[in-house]
Image (cartoon, rainbow, N blue to C red):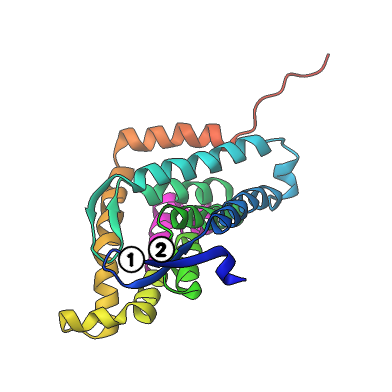
Amino acid sequence: MFQFFTMPAQDAYGVDAVTLTHAGFYAVAALIAALVVTALVMRPKAERAKGITTKQLVFSAAAMALGTVASMIKFADLPMGGSITLFSMLFIVLIGHWYGAKIGITTAVAYGLLQFILQPVFYTLPQVLIDYPLAFGALGISGFFRSRKNGLVIGYLAAVLGRYFFAFLSGMIFFGAYAADYHMSIPAYSLSYNAMYLFPEAALTIAALYAAPVKNALARIRRIAVEAPHRQAVM
């Protein structure tokens, strides 16, 4: 069954790996669509009654699209994966901040699968689960902090740390052999390697979030994304 969705491949260094077949691409694409729909179904009844299903769908899809485009604009690209991008994580964090953890995590998992489709070369199924649905899905935990003062900044930092944990875990389990090349222990290698791309991007993003033009723009977008449209009274 697994062979129906995958086929042998090699990574950029000539190491044996696996990639998706056409059936595999379709299966992951269907899973992404199902996750986005699930995110909307999981909304509280009070929100469903407001009739903003289409708005949440549009903003969730837009965040995934913008995050994907931003992930391709890289300030630095590390040799074994990972890059400092143009605030790509922020777009996904915003969905959790606007709509809560359930929708945020589900959308973030879908985004992780979309990132996987863009570069579908992997080694084992557990590695895929940790590096994509779990690592990127952690960006949705920003929703747990949406009601706190400075909730976006706190939620963003928590989301980055969540992704950092799963990236560290993946480095420990699947890529620890590279630690010997740098004369480091496996935990130290994984901690330092993943910090090299996640924390610089986080620092740049936090600095941008405190800039007055960005704060004002995000406040306006939040009102559009969250507030229900005004309805005229029926005469």
> For the N terminus, which image quadrant?
bottom right
Horizontal placement of 128 versus 78: left or right?
A: right
Horizontal placement of 72 versus 140: left or right?
A: left
Residue located 39% across and 76% down the image: 169
Dot 1, how many residues are within 10 Å of its Cα: few (below 14), some (14-19), or many (20+)? some
- Contact between labelled residues 2 and 1, with CB atoms less than 8 Å apart: yes
Q: Which residue is mark 2?
A: 121
C-alpha span from label 1 to label 2 = 7 Å
Q: Which residue is mark 1?
A: 11
Instruction: Tell me which amino acid carries mark 2.
Output: Val
- The magenta segment is 139-164
Horizontal placement of 129 versus 217: left or right?
A: right
Q: Main secondary structure of the magenta part?
A: helix
- Specify whether residue 142 is painted magenta: yes
Residue at the limit of the structure toward the top, as seen here = 235
Q: Residue 58: x, y in percent? A: 57, 36
Frontmost residue, 234 versus 125: 125
Dot 2, how many residues are within 10 Å of its Cα: few (below 14), some (14-19), or many (20+)? many
Instruction: Tell me which amino acid carries mark 1.
Output: Asp
The numbered mark, 1 or 2, whose residue comes first in the sequence reads: 1
